[in-house]
Image (tube, rainbow, N blue to C red):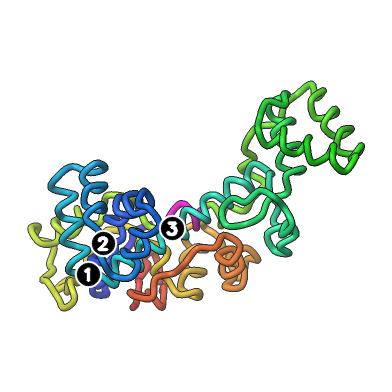
């Protein structure tokens, strides 16, 4: 399929900022709580610059520092999106490993559990039994915790299931990719776009003869329709536009159950992933062999 974007690329600058926050969020996450609170409130702790210097090449670290100063609101919003993406990634991994179920996510069934991961409570019994089935031993600390809790409540059922798990002749794969919809995996994989490409595209637009000139707000205006494609970060899409795009990218139909607007919204709720307030791609239009994004 060929792709063409005839709209102004207003989102490219924001996508490049979002890309920079992949390093920035790692640095923020290493600060102590007080310094993190200062950052979220709008400050830039000196310790943050030090952390950036440890994580990134000097010129890139300086570029991120300038981005913080010139785009303070957007940078912090995109860091929150990064944080939510980590939550979504963690939840998806637990689902793929069958340490957590969709029903447990939907019903918040584990609110009384002692374990927490990806911002949700985990059932230590399910978690431990899955580890025992995959590894064939009880060496993991989570299995130790489950055994201790089962002893306290004299849970003979757990010990019988644990024994069966340890005696399995064939171990299941650690990750079952077919157990969770490809839609959920696609959302997590591309929620923050494709790493490292957006700044490159900006420089190319500015230097190559592609029929574009700089527009307002860091975008680009086309004097002729280009014919190439790279995906915007999925966090920039509205619900309806995201459903249309997911269906097209996964070669499904919009009316399919797992690519409906309701299904997409449900997955984002389960995964706990946050959208960008701006920019917002509000329409995805498919026409012949082209796809148009409209703001």
Q: Quadrant of the C terminus?
A: bottom left
Mark 1 and 2 residues: CB-CB less than 8 Å, in contact? Answer: yes
Query: Considering the numbered disc 3 on the image, is that residue within a helix, a strand or a loop?
Result: helix
Instruction: Give whichever of discs 2 and 3 has the lower sequence position.
Output: 2
Residue 64, percent from left and from top: 20, 56
Determine the main secondary structure of the stretch shown in magenta.
Answer: helix
Q: Is residue 126 above or below residue 137?
A: below
Residue position marked by numbered label 2 in the rendering: 17
Which residue is painted at 37% across and 56% down in the image? 193
Residue depth check, mark 2 versus mark 3: number of the one nearer the observer: 3
**For mark 1, what is the residue?**
71
What span is colored magenta in the figure? 186-191
Give the number of the mark in front: 1 or 2. 1
- Left or right of 282? Residue 222 is left
Left or right for 239, reference 144: left
* Residue where numbered disc 3 is placed: 83
Residue at mark 2 to residue at mark 3: CA–CA distance: 15 Å
> How dense is the environment of label 3, judged by Cα within 10 Å: few (below 14), some, or many (20 and up)?
some
Mark 1 is surrounded, within 10 Å at the Cα level, by few (under 14), some (14 to 19) or many (20 or more) other residues, namely few
| Residue 81 coordinates in the image, percent (x, y) | 41, 63
Where is residue 263 shown, x and y percent of the image? 62, 68
Q: Is residue 4 magenta?
A: no
Looking at the image, which is closer to me, 110 or 241?
Answer: 110
């Amino acid at each position: 399929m060929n792709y063409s974007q005839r709209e102004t690329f207003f989102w490219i600058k924001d996508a490049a900022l979002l890309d920079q926050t992949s390093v920035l969020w790692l640095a923020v996450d290493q600060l102590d709580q007080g310094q993190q609170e200062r950052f979220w409130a709008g400050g830039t702790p000196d310790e943050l610059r030090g952390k950036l210097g440890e994580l990134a090449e000097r010129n890139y670290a300086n570029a991120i520092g300038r981005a913080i100063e010139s785009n303070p609101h957007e940078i912090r919003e995109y860091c929150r999106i990064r944080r939510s993406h980590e939550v979504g990634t963690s939840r998806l991994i637990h689902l793929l490993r069958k340490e957590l179920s969709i029903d447990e996510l939907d019903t918040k069934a584990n609110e009384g559990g002692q374990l927490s991961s990806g911002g949700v409570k985990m059932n230590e019994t399910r978690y431990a039994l899955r580890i025992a089935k995959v590894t064939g031993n009880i060496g993991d600390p989570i299995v130790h915790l489950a055994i201790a809790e089962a002893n306290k409540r004299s849970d003979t059922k757990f010990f019988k299931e644990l024994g069966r798990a340890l005696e399995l002749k064939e171990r299941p794969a650690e990750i079952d990719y077919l157990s969770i919809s490809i839609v959920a995996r696609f959302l997590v994989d591309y929620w923050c776009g494709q790493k490292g490409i957006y700044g490159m595209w900006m420089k190319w637009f500015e230097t190559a003869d592609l029929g574009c000139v700089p527009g307002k707000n860091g975008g680009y205006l086309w004097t002729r329709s280009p014919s190439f494609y790279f995906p915007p970060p999925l966090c920039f899409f509205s619900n309806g536009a995201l459903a249309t795009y997911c269906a097209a990218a996964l070669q499904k139909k919009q009316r399919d159950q797992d690519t409906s607007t309701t299904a997409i919204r449900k997955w984002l709720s389960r995964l706990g992933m946050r959208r960008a307030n701006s920019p917002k791609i509000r329409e995805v239009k498919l026409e012949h062999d082209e796809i148009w994004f409209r703001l």
